[in-house]
Amino acid sequence: MSPRSLFFLLAAAVQLQAAEQPLALPLWPEGAPGSEARKGEPEKQEGSNVANVHNPSITPFIPAKNATGTAVLIAPGGGHSKLCLGHEGYALAEWFRDHGIAAFVLKYRLAREKGSSYTIQDHAMADTRRALRLIRSRAAEWGVKQGRLGVMGFSAGGELAAFAAMKNDPGRPDAADAVERESSRPDFQALIYPGTSGLFSASKGMPPLFIACGYGDRPDISEGMASLYLKYKAAGVKAELHIYSEAGHGFGYRPGTTTAAGRWPERFVEWLTDSGLLR
């Protein structure tokens, strides 16, 4: 095959993948609070990574068959300076969809991107909580059952997932915006090698927790997750911890991986089943 033919073949494959990609849905129709003026500013894409997010959104991956009624909001990592939408976003969402679990990939505002005026707690967390409310507001349409919506985050996104479980609210019944009437509390949480573990806490009544990380990761993550597990146990909140001996940071999910760490989504589904969150 000539180089020219190969180029056109690869271009066609990229276009086909883009055509198959579900459309992203903005979290706020008129723009995110504080970012309305930048709503129309285009995102910057480099490979599978995205930056310059000013109109936060979710991309839904809804099972066409064998739907279980369970759903997961996925917050990709990227150090709050970019979003790693490949191995920490779309690939996993497709895997969940194919296993009957609705998945929603979150694009949130980036607090550590060069020149950013955003903060994690005021903007990225507002996006995370709004995404949970939005999914609940359309639960009937997307086949999401009550008590079956969780949040999962990788690295920086893991911070958002943990904070969402730590601080949330039942919604405002009198809100003019129907989305804001919904709860922002996740029914379960999954932290995949999350950062900032020293800021995580556990208290009675918090959502059950699944953790996966690598032995070779930074001590604040590998040892921090062991400590967090013990905090949850002391609080009487059920948790499951997987520390993979041959893994470091950023293993995410890559189709075709045969390592133990690469098959963590299977362990996660087993955990959901054992916990009564997947039937």
Image (spheres, rainbow, N blue to C red):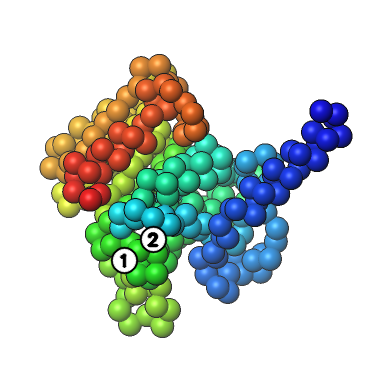
- Is residue 79 something one can see in this rendering? no
| x, y percent for residue 248 | 45, 22
Residue at 52% in and 37% down: 87
Residue 221 lies in quadrant: top left
Which residue occupies the foreground of this view, 151 or 115?
151
Residue 241 lies in quadrant: top left
Q: Identify the residue position indicated by label 2 in the image.
A: 132
- The crowding category of the residue bearing disc 1, from other C-alpha atoms within 10 Å (few below 14, some 14 to 19, many at least 20), is many
How far apart are labels 2 and 1 at the CA level? 8 Å
| x, y percent for residue 108 | 53, 54
**Is residue 36 found left or right of 8 in the rendered image?**
left
Q: In this rendering, is residue 157 above or below 67?
A: above
Q: In this rendering, is residue 168 above or below 165?
A: below
| x, y percent for residue 270 | 26, 38
Q: Earlier in the sequence, mark 2 or mark 1?
A: 2
**Quarter of the image that includes the N terminus:** top right
| Mark 2 touches mark 1? (CB < 8 Å) | yes
Residue furthest out toward the top: 246
Q: Identify the residue position indicated by label 1 in the image.
A: 183
- Is residue 2 something one can see in this rendering? yes
